[in-house]
Amino acid sequence: MEDGLDLLLLFEEMLLSEKLSSRNTLRAYKSDIKSFIKFININYNSPISSVETKHISDWLISLSDNNINRNSYLRKLSSIKEFYKFLHVEGIIKLDPTKSIEAPKKINNIPIVLSIKQIEEIIEYIKRELTPNNIRLLALVEIMYSTGLRVEELVSMPLNAINFNNNSIFIIGKGGRERIVPFGENACGAIKNYLEVRSLYLAKGQSSEYLFPSSGIKGYLTSRRFAQLLKNVVAKTSVAHLSISPHILRHTFATHMLSGGADLRVLQEMLGHADISTVQIYTHIVDDKKKLALSSHPMENG
């Protein structure tokens, strides 16, 4: 019986060389396929290359029985489909057993979105005590709420990406796609105030290309550290019960932009999404808020 882990190794090499997959993607694929191999080894006396559609269906049923969330289920199914597609293309198997298995349509979880009042409360709390750390945090929050940048785009931003002549930031996003994103006056003021204390985050005599330098391995403030700093502040506000991450600020930016009448295509460009359907989740949030507002109408409460 062939070793399924050997086939996984071949698959991993292909992902690295042809698809140039990220570490996180590789880790997810490996984890999903290893758990699938383990399931087959325990339940069937069959090599991985001889697995049939019914075996995969049984595995999917076992996942459902374990109550994993829908998005994890879809990712695991996608991992196995990619794995067997690779084995088929390489001629290791004659038929792809996953070909007839259709993935259910992905339901996007509607993300948490802060109200204008809630985001103002967080910002005002940071402003209460303008220590260097709070000045830096204020710049991070104001930029994110003003531009909707991805967290990693924000923390790893080069200093020279900012153009104060027209209040814009030059971003190289996912897939190397370039975009220019404008920022507002509040963000502009927060950045300028932060630049006055930025040198405190540099070792003596050192310079850095990053707007938010750090002595860590990456050379810039990590998204995890940003999340931690934000969480510490949020814990002291009225939204402490919500799980607020930097990513929620991106959702909030997008929703507030749409609520204010921003064009969906413009928002797609600002967020750096290749596909407009990804942006349409925010229209659902805005529509839900409108329905909620309508329920307050005196004629709706008969």
Image (cartoon, rainbow, N blue to C red):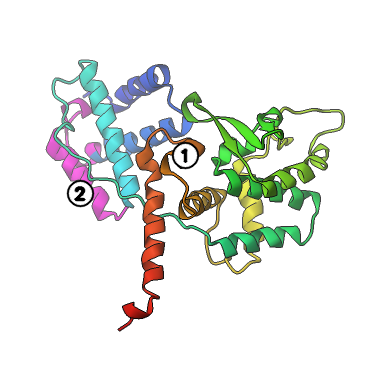
| Crowd around label 2: few <14 · some 14–19 · many ≥20 (10 Å) | few
Give the distance between the C-alpha atoms of the residues marked 2 and 1, in whole angstroms: 42 Å
**Residue beneath the point at 74% across and 46% down:** 189
Tell me the SS state at disc 2.
helix
Q: Residue 294 carries which label?
A: none
154 to 111, vertically: above or below: above
**Residue beneath the point at 16% across and 39% down:** 55
| Crowd around label 1: few <14 · some 14–19 · many ≥20 (10 Å) | few
Residue 254: x and y in percent read 49, 49
Q: What secondary structure do most residues of the magenta stretch adopt?
A: helix
142 to 299, vertically: above or below: above
Left or right position of 62 against 239: left
Q: Give the range drawn in magenta.
A: 40-68
Question: Which amino acid, mark 1?
Answer: Val
Nearest to viewer (mark 2 / mark 1): 1
Question: Which amino acid, mark 2?
Answer: Ile
Residue 1: x and y in percent read 21, 24
Mark 1 lies on residue: 266
